[in-house]
């Protein structure tokens, strides 16, 4: 239900965040030894990876770690599977495949190109979310297939490439700058994901169709992930970190 107090608190926090960012920018611009040089923040090699990371995490993180497990365990409209079984068929394959595929994608990145491997993973993640949304909500095997593909493409490819790009695109004089900022973008995106997607689920639950609510949530995550793919097109190619024939 709508709560005016919650709305005012949210608006107040947004204002505080804006003021804090302005203060941060002003201090860093004037400092003789800034923690973050504002000239770096203006570069496409900085804000494009950070935007991609934030949007990717926002679109996918809560889907695989919250929405899908909740749906699979729900008796209606889900499949009524217990938490142990859910972990075995959903979360464990997703995590294990990400762990196994990660080194492979990391090895391929310098050869095929970091941005190319990233975009392959992004497209695969979009396909995985589409499978979950349009087939997985009605079929447990298709749900498993979607999460397996998400483990390969998102956990094992996209996350690895975003971390790698944070290293290879970092300024030469400050190699820890972009990895640190990117870690913040991962955390921000994860938080936003659990803020936005469950809120969509609650907002659409008033329609009286629980399955439609879950469908809406996953589609919203899919749309945000498409926006993340669009942002990834702006990431410059780290030529010096790639192998040329």
Image (spheres, rainbow, N blue to C red):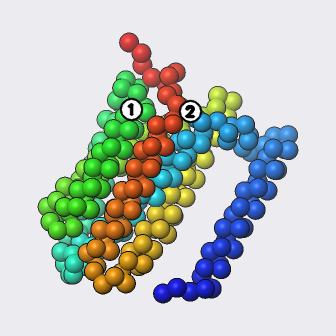
Left or right: 218 in relation to 182? left
- Corner quadrant of residue 88: bottom left
Secondary structure of the residue carrying tag 2 is loop
Secondary structure of the residue carrying tag 1 is helix
Q: Would you say the residues marked 1 and 2 are in contact, meaning their CB atoms lie under 8 Å apart?
A: no
What number of labels is visible? 2
What residue occupies the far top of the structure in this picture?
245
At horizontal 52% and vertical 21% (from top left) the residue drawn is 240
Residue in the foreground of this view, choosing between 180 and 129: 129
Q: In the image, is residue 45 above or below residue 231?
A: above
Instruction: Identify the residue under disc 1.
Output: 116
Image location of residue 83, percent across then percent down: 25, 74
At horizontal 30% and vertical 56% (from top left) the residue drawn is 129
At horizontal 74% and vertical 40% (from top left) the residue drawn is 37
Residue in the foreground of this view, choosing between 224 and 111: 224
Image location of residue 10, percent across then percent down: 62, 74
Q: Residues within 10 Å of mark 2 (few under 14, many from 20)?
A: many
Q: In the image, is residue 14 above or below residue 186?
A: below
Please identify, in this view, whether the residue under mark 1 or under mark 2 is nearer the observer: 1
Q: Which mark sits nearer the N-terminus, 1 or 2? A: 1
Q: Check the picture and name the quadrant holding the C terminus.
A: top left
- Corner quadrant of residue 94: bottom left
Label 1, label 2: how many angstroms apart (C-alpha)? 15 Å
Left or right: 117 in relation to 71? right
Image location of residue 136, percent across then percent down: 20, 63
Please say whether residue 233 is visible from this viewpoint. yes
Image location of residue 226, percent across then percent down: 40, 49
Q: Residues within 10 Å of mark 1 (few under 14, many from 20)?
A: some
At horizontal 58% and vertical 35% (from top left) the residue drawn is 45
Instruction: Identify the residue under disc 2.
Output: 169
Residue in the foreground of this view, choosing between 147 and 200: 200
């Amino acid at each position: 239900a709508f709560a005016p107090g919650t709305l005012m608190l949210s608006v107040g926090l947004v204002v505080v965040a804006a003021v804090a960012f302005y203060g941060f920018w002003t201090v860093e611009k004037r400092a003789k030894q800034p923690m973050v040089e504002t000239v770096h923040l203006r570069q496409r090699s900085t804000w494009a990876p950070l935007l991609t990371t934030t949007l990717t995490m926002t679109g996918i993180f809560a889907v695989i770690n919250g929405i899908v497990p909740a749906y699979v365990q729900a008796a209606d409209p889900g499949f009524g599977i217990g938490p142990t079984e859910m972990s075995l068929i959903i979360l464990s394959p997703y995590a294990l495949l990400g762990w196994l595929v990660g080194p492979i994608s990391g090895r391929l990145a310098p050869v095929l190109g970091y941005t190319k491997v990233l975009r392959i993973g992004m497209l695969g993640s979009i396909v995985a979310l589409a499978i979950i949304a349009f087939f997985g909500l009605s079929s447990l095997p298709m749900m498993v297939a979607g999460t397996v593909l998400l483990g390969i493409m998102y956990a094992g490819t996209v996350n690895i490439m975003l971390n790698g790009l944070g290293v290879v695109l970092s300024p030469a004089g400050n190699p820890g700058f972009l990895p640190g900022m990117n870690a913040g973008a991962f955390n921000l995106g994860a938080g936003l994901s659990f803020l936005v997607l469950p809120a969509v689920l609650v907002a659409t639950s008033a329609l009286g169709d629980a399955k439609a609510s879950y469908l809406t949530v996953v589609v919203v995550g899919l749309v945000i992930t498409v926006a993340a793919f669009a942002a990834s097109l702006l990431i410059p190619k780290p030529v010096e970190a790639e192998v040329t024939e």
